[in-house]
Image (cartoon, grey):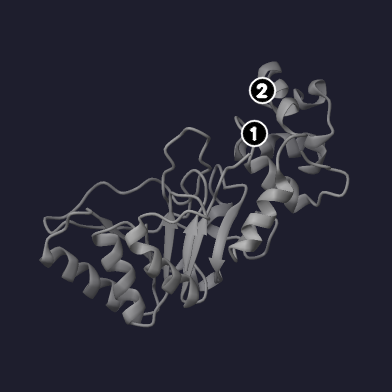
Amino acid sequence: MSLRQGSIPFGGRADHFNGNGTCIRSPLLAMCRPKTGDSPNSGFACGAARCVLVTSALYFGMDTTNMTEQEAYIALNMMERIGPVGVRSLVSVLGSAHAIFTASSRDLQQADGIGPELAAAIVSQRDSVPLEEELARADATGTRIITPLDEEYPEGLRQIHDPPLALYVRGRLRPADRHAVAVVGTRRATHYGMDAARKLSYQLGKAGVCVMSGLALGIDTAAHEGALRAKGRTAAVIGSGFDHLYPDENVVLAERIAEHG
């Protein structure tokens, strides 16, 4: 399974490695949304059937008349300057995410943290979000978009302060994936470090633990390969768009992760 969201799902990237270039991080389900112009971070969310690829993309009208509540969350995820905390505040006041697309600037400002400037930014964007185009692109790549309203949404993410508004997923997310260990590390690992990462991930996969990593070269690649070799679960949380896998060298690996998920 491969995963990606926008801002990082699961906390930030670990930056403490052992002498072999291997970093092991306890799972912390937390994804973030990337903003245009920002350098997306990767995080993690557990994947599905054996592996899952989750991404959260932000791409930027639209008729909101028949928009579902889930679609409203996806559209809000595509907007600048408004994130999970702001949306939660607005929903608590307006009653639904859909209502954000029809509320007046004054009504939007009734929510905590929403001032005149942010309200104006929301109003200026909400009718021009290319939601239908985004949904079509996701469908064309076999990517599902899940929101906090969906049963499949990772329970661990629901518990954090700013749960991602949308997760772009290939594969299946399973409740059992909450038993996960993140294995990440340097892109320039030693042979010993690569071997250690593969063996550790293999054993984790055999034990039924979901191996989380970021699909980068080096230790990340070894971690995914080890879990796949054990026919276990692995999830790749990527920082590039769902329709632009990076690095190119791992496109085949990403497909293996998604196919086995």
Assign a secondary structure to mark 2. helix
Relative image position of residue 112 (x, y in whole percent):
68, 27
Mark closer to the observer (1, 2) = 2
Residue 118, numbered label? 2
Amino acid type at circle 2 is: Leu
Residue 111 in sight here: no
Residue drawn at x 23%, y 54% is 187
Relative image position of residue 189 (x, y in whole percent):
16, 58
Distance, label 1 to label 2, CA atoms, is 10 Å
Residue drawn at x 35%, y 63% is 250
Residue drawn at x 45%, y 51% is 10
Instruction: Give the mark nearest the N terminus, 1 or 2.
Output: 1
51 relative to 188 in the view: left or right: right
Is the residue marked by circle 2 packed among few (<14), some (14-19), or many (20+) residues within 10 Å?
A: some
199 relative to 139 in the view: left or right: left
44 relative to 99 in the view: left or right: left
Q: Is residue 143 above or below residue 132?
A: below
Q: Is residue 43 above or below residue 36?
A: below
Number of labelled discs? Answer: 2
Residue in front for this viewpoint, 180 or 185: 185
Residue 12, numbered label? none
Q: Are marks 1 and 2 in contact (CB under 8 Å)?
A: yes
Residue 86, numbered label? 1
